[in-house]
Amino acid sequence: MARQSGKTNTMFAVLGILSLGPHTGYDIKQHMEQSTSYFWNENYGQIYPSLAELLDRKDIALEVIRQKGKPDKKLYSITDQGRQTLSDWLSQPMEHVVMLKKNELLLRVFFGGNSSPETIIRHIQEHKEKLMESLHIFEELERWLINVEHKDHNHKYWMITMIYGKSQFSSLISWCDESIKVLSS
């Protein structure tokens, strides 16, 4: 299988969420915001076309639930074929992205000699505050994961993902502290 495009990866993200149980399109978006949003998030404009394509491919099934006084509820679930599609994708080689190609903070720091150290320190401090907010989310996630241990077969994978995020943000916070120290001297 050739390397996947971003559009196709959206389909795999949707399949992954559906592998956890049936969801509506709205539920998929909410689940992503609560679980994968720090490393992978999709908007409704990506989710619904992916659901349509996955239905055409027979990777998912649709159950329409009639509701009194409300629009019909569309509940999607992964099929056996969809589980195989997801499994096949998981086993394929992937493109490894070590560092983002665009980082405005680093661009400003790199050209910081054209400004004052105080200005660049302010940018780094503001960035550090955002990183600390994200780290706090991972600390909350870690507490939650400790409570679901052994209740879900996905637990160890969720824990590894959480450790990655926590390590990444902790490391970037250390970089901020070191950079501020350098610029303050």
Image (tube, rainbow, N blue to C red):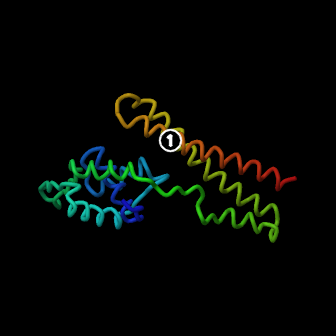
Quadrant including the N terminus:
bottom left
Q: Which residue is mark 1?
A: 162
State the residue at coordinates (40%, 35%). Answer: 155
Q: Farthest right residue?
A: 185
In the image, 88: left or right of 3?
left
Q: Farthest front residue?
A: 1
State the residue at coordinates (21%, 47%). Answer: 80
Q: Farthest bottom residue?
A: 114
In the image, 158: left or right of 164?
left
Q: Locate residue 178, reporting x and y percent.
A: 77, 48
Tag count in the figure? 1
Badge 1 marks a residue whose secondary structure is: helix
State the residue at coordinates (61%, 47%). Answer: 132
Q: Locate residue 90, reporting x and y percent.
A: 38, 49
Q: Locate residue 65, reporting x and y percent.
A: 14, 54
Q: 148 or 12: which is nearer to us?
A: 12
Near mark 1 (Cα within 10 A), the count class, few <14, some 14-19 or many ≥20, is many
* Amino acid under disc 1: Met
